Amino acid sequence: MTARPVKRSLTLHGHRTSVSLEDPFWRAFRDIADREGKPINVLAAQIDETRGVDAGLASAIRVYVLDYYQNAAQPES
């Protein structure tokens, strides 16, 4: 089992905010940003722009990470 979520700071469109993510999700999120050649704040802002009003940013990041790796695991057709 993973440890409790840790509060992390991000800057979205010039405004500071924070998200609470477990270490494995934070590491995966940073890895995806590196793979995509984007600063983590840019990727977070993109996720923030597409999330629904009912979804928190931390939850949207977790779903993004899960979707990213599920899509990567799919065999190419």
Image: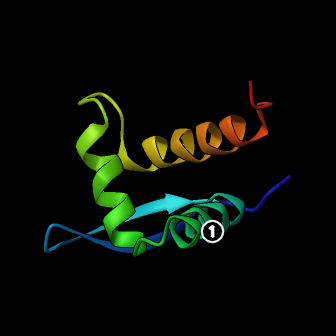
Residue drawn at point x = 30 percent, y = 52 percent: 46
Vertical order, 58 against 40 (above or below): above
The picture places residue 74, in percent across and down from the top left corner, at 76, 31
Residue 29, picture quadrant: bottom right
On the image, the x and y values in percent for residue 23 come to 68, 66
| Helix, strand or loop for disc 1 | helix
Tally of marks: 1
Residue 44 in percent (x, y) is at: 36, 59
Judging depth in this view, the residue of 33 and 25 nearest the camera is: 33
Q: Which residue is mark 1?
A: 31
Relative placement, left or right, of 74 versus 9 is right
Graded by Cα atoms within 10 Å as few (under 14), some (14 to 19) or many (20 or more), the crowding at tag 1 reads: some
Which of the 4 image quarters holds residue 17? Answer: bottom left
Q: Identify the image quadrant of the C terminus.
A: top right
Left or right relative to 25: residue 62: left
Residue at figure coordinates x 58%, y 62% from the top left: 32
Which residue is more in the foreground, 64 or 24?
64
Residue type marked 1: Asp
